[in-house]
């Protein structure tokens, strides 16, 4: 897939110009903050969310809900604690 995501504080025009050699037509998503990105909206599930959005197999997949990362962490340790249950769930499936 040619789609990719750019997180940058610069304007979208500046970013797309600087990445013009890598962007194929309109195959990119742009956001200004981590919390707007697919990494924060679908933590630990960005790949699944991408395929559900662009290649859904069922109506449920087409309208998959996000699980956004909270924006009120004071430390990285707090963020890690929030992510830990997601990581443990993945490990339990191995």
Image: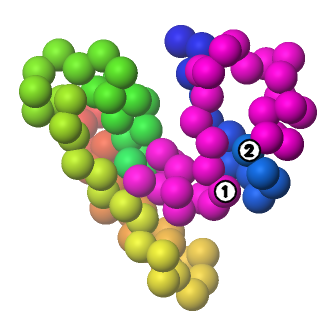
Nearest the eye: 69 or 17? 17
> Mark 2 sits on what residue?
12
Which residue bears the numbered disc 1?
Answer: 32
Q: In which quarter of the image is residue 60?
A: top left
Identify which residue, 94 or 28, lies in the foreground: 28
**Image check: 42 left or right of 72?**
left
Res. 86 visible in picture: yes
11 vs 84: above or below: above
Q: Where is residue 15 in the image (x, y as percent from the top left)?
A: 81, 40
Residue 51 magenta-highlighted: no
Q: How far apart are marks 2 and 1 (CA)?
A: 9 Å
Residue at 73% across, 20% down: 23
Instruction: Write the residue at 30% across / 51% down.
Output: 66
Query: Left of 1 or right of it: where is 50?
Result: left
Point 18% across, 30% down: residue: 61
Quadrant of the image for the C terminus? top left
- In the picture, the disc for residue 88 is none
* Residue 48 in view: no
Tell me where residue 28 appears, x and y as whole percent: 61, 28
* SS for callout 1: loop
Looking at the image, which residue is at 63% across and 60% down? 33
Stretch of the chain drawn in magenta: 13-41
* Residue at the extreme right: 18
| Mark toward the viewer: 2 or 1 | 2
Going from the N terminus, do you reach mark 2 or mark 1 first?
Answer: 2
Q: Is residue 35 magenta?
A: yes
Question: Residue 22's x, y, as percent?
Answer: 79, 18
What is the residue that sits farthest to the bottom in this orientation? 74
Secondary structure found at label 2: helix
């Amino acid at each position: 897939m040619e789609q990719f995501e750019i997180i940058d504080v610069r304007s979208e025009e500046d970013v797309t110009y600087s990445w013009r050699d890598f962007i194929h037509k309109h195959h990119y998503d742009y956001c200004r903050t981590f919390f707007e990105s697919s990494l924060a909206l679908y933590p630990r599930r960005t790949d699944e969310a991408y395929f559900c959005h662009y290649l859904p197999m069922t109506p449920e997949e087409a309208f998959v809900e996000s699980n956004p990362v909270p924006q009120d962490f004071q430390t990285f340790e707090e963020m890690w604690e929030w992510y830990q249950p997601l990581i443990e769930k993945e490990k339990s499936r191995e």
